[in-house]
Amino acid sequence: MPVQRVFLVGPMGAGKSTIGRVLADELSLRFVDSDSEIEARTGADIPWIFDVEGESGFRERERQVIEEMTTWDGIVLATGGGAVLAPENRTALAGRGFVVYLYTSIDEQVRRTRRDRKRPLLQGVDPEATLRELMRIRDPLYREIADCVIDTAAGTPKSVAQQVALAIPG
């Protein structure tokens, strides 16, 4: 039976949403994004949720959405970069689908997120230092639950999606 749930994890700027859309088309599955789902349910964007509820409020919303979305069949799910911080999320992701860690270097993350004002964690004085610290904490968590690791730096969204498709069993 073909895989019915593919979960994309990885840092900001790895291409989870872009590659996820292409991959969903490739696999004839529906693309969903946990951050977009949170925004749709709250009627507010992620930066606003961070401002009003703080990171902990956002993470609780994220936990609830991932608990639900990981039970949906026929999806490619792009998660937020910090989704792996909650042990409950790691358990749900690892136990309910095929987890792909979309890896990219710090330099590539900096390049891809440089002009993005919608990432609350990167609005400080040294976004590169923030990305390095986030990667130090999160990389082992991504690897802990990943069924495969794909480096996104060298390929196009289509070529990376094809690599992912080839890595999926069935």
Image (cartoon, helix red, strand yellow):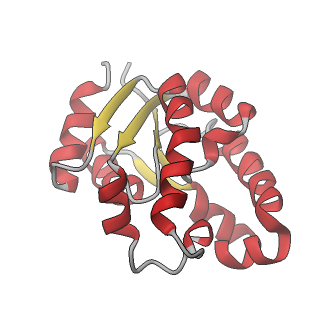
Vertical side of 121 occupied by 32: above or below:
above
Vertical side of 17 occupied by 85: above or below:
above
- Residue at horizontal 76%, vertical 61%? 55
- Residue at horizontal 70%, vertical 43%? 68
| Numbered circles on residues, count | 0
Q: Is residue 79 visible?
A: no
Residue 75's spot in the image, x, y percent? 47, 43
Q: Is residue 80 visible?
A: yes
- Residue at horizontal 20%, vertical 36%? 163
Vertical side of 38 occupied by 6: above or below:
above
- Residue at horizontal 49%, vertical 56%? 131
Residue 108's spot in the image, x, y percent? 30, 58
Residue nearest the viewer, comparing 159 with 48: 48
Quadrant placement of the C terminus? top left
Instruction: Give the left or right position of residue 78, taking residue 160 as reference.
Output: right
Q: Quadrant of residue 148?
A: top left
Residue nearest the viewer, comparing 107 with 45: 107
Quadrant placement of the N terminus? top left
Q: Quadrant of residue 157?
A: bottom left
Residue 84's spot in the image, x, y percent? 62, 39
Q: Quadrant of residue 28?
A: top left
Residue 60's spot in the image, x, y percent? 81, 52
Instruction: Give the left or right position of residue 27, taking residue 50 as reference.
Output: left
